[in-house]
Image (tube, coloured by chain):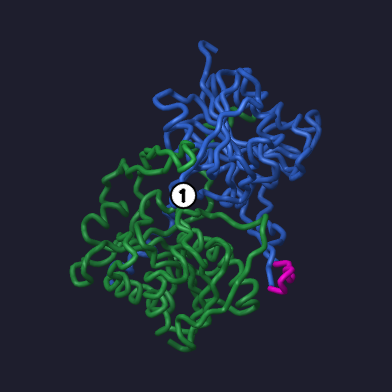
Chain colours: A blue, B green
Amino acid sequence: MSQRKTILISNDDGITAKGIKSLIEVAKQFGDVYVVAPDSPQSAQGHAITLEDPIRIYKTDIFGEEVVAYECSGTPVDCIKIAKHLVLKGKKIDLCVSGINHGSNASTNIIYSGTMSAAMEAAMEGIPAIGFSLLDYQADANFDGAKAYAQKLIAEVLENGMGNANLLNVNIPQLPADQIKGMKVCRQAKGYWKEDFLEGKDPMGRAYYWLTGKYEYQDQGEESDIWALENGYVSIVPVQYDLTEYSSLDSLQKLEKL
Amino acid sequence: MSQRKTILISNDDGITAKGIKSLIEVAKQFGDVYVVAPDSPQSAQGHAITLEDPIRIYKTDIFGEEVVAYECSGTPVDCIKIAKHLVLKGKKIDLCVSGINHGSNASTNIIYSGTMSAAMEAAMEGIPAIGFSLLDYQADANFDGAKAYAQKLIAEVLENGMGNANLLNVNIPQLPADQIKGMKVCRQAKGYWKEDFLEGKDPMGRAYYWLTGKYEYQDQGEESDIWALENGYVSIVPVQYDLTEYSSLDSLQKLEKL
């Protein structure tokens, strides 16, 4: 590569998670790394932003002297906004990477994901962005396979761009690095969370409900991200933020006559 | 209509907001209304859900005896999950309406919106859903125009469905009802928030940052929601939650060879 790149990193599991440390170790090889990440876990925060409260940032050296890192009191999307507009004000950001998330963001999980919302926010501001997620929720998950593929993708994207896309949702199966079969470019699988609520009583005797459930796939198509992951591939889905369902426009024209 | 319908209502401004009261007044004419809404304002919560904490709901009679209403400690998306899986367990929901939001959810604002995320959650669970937003952020905004168009749309959708769509983003201009020119079926306009942060010091002398900014439209196309609203129309955008950018798939194929 011709010159050192500027890479912004965030996540939603919080700045002390093993996943973001793994991603920083990879990204450091390619350029100057700036980290702005939540000071506490922010999973399933979606595209939440903080409007009603002030946001605080504190510099931290937990990643060593060569990494400029801040922990932030806000959401993952707040972190990207603070990074672009304060920490890196006026500086060109070559790539934003988010994650590596502890747990899948494949299929419609992307919609709930703080990791992917951070990446989407960067993309909306014109920064090429990739969200990485490993299909392992454990705090001490093994990120070796995820790191190997993050390394390949970051190298490729910094050198040659990402085609017509500017935002990728990358999920990595929970397999040893040498058992991952490669990468598949996919579409988002259809599916949804079938909820259940654990009911209980708190120490004051008041009822509470705790969200649980399991993911129902409605889609086993070979071109879907779920198929790729279940068959040992890394899934790569290009992501858009124009939510217009163009195929429905014609069928709604009659509403204009009401 | 042949029989009374079951209508679920939520919002993100909280259960005491004028906007949800206005929407309930409209919906009551068409069926049995069930409300599960946040117990406090949840604007800009995006598609956040509560995983790390229990959720509580409390019954309330603030909308009178004929409306079954609960205030909920969770996010707008939590409210829909609780409504479907606990409050209305097993009951068919004919329509979910969310709002009326105090402030625009046109263009990419949909991505940050708790009001639209509640509607999207319902749609993902197979319930036809509409999010309504008025272009007025004030707590005491005049909802007369918004109510008139919500009435037209709810009547039409309950009677005849919503074409191929199952989720609509409806924004209403801040105009007297008789000055609104009608409804336009639109696409989501391109645009983004150009952030700024108000910097200050708290009573302990620590720096804080408060998100502010203004919306930059990159799009004045006559088929966009922003154009419709600026020209006195109600905008209706059909919304999808398949975020795959299909047009980029081919250009990414080379990644499979890495």
Q: Nearer the viewer, residue A116 or A13?
A: A13
| Depth check, front residue: A133 or A62 | A62
Location of residue B157 in the rendering, given as x and y in whole percent from the top left corner: 41, 74
- Secondary element under disc 1, as helix, strand or loop, is loop
The residue labelled by disc 1 is: A53
Q: Is residue B215 above or below residue A199?
A: above
**How busy is the neighbourhood of tag 1: few (under 14 within 10 Å), some, or many (20 plus)?**
few
Decide: is A82 above or below B96.
above
Q: How many marks?
A: 1
What kind of residue is marked 1?
Asp
Task: Tell me if A186 is positioned left or right of B164 in this view.
Answer: right
- The quarter of the displayed image where residue A150 is located: top right
Specify the segment rendered in magenta.
Answer: A197-206
For the question of whether residue B246 can be seen, the reply is no
Residue at the far left in the pictured view? B179
- Quarter of the image where the N terminus of chain A is located: top right
Q: Quadrant of the C terminus of chain A?
A: bottom left
Where, by quadrant of the figure, is residue B71 drawn? bottom right
Q: Is residue A204 magenta?
A: yes
- Residue B253 against residue B58 in the figure, above or below: above
- Left or right, B231 with respect to A13, comes to left
Whether B7 is among the magenta residues is no
Chain containing mark 1: A
Residue B51 screen position, x and y as percent: 66, 56
Q: Position of residue A106 (x, y in %)?
A: 64, 46
Residue depicted at x 57% and y 50%: A45
- Residue B167 location, x and y as percent? 46, 63
Q: State the residue lying farthest toward the front.
A: B204
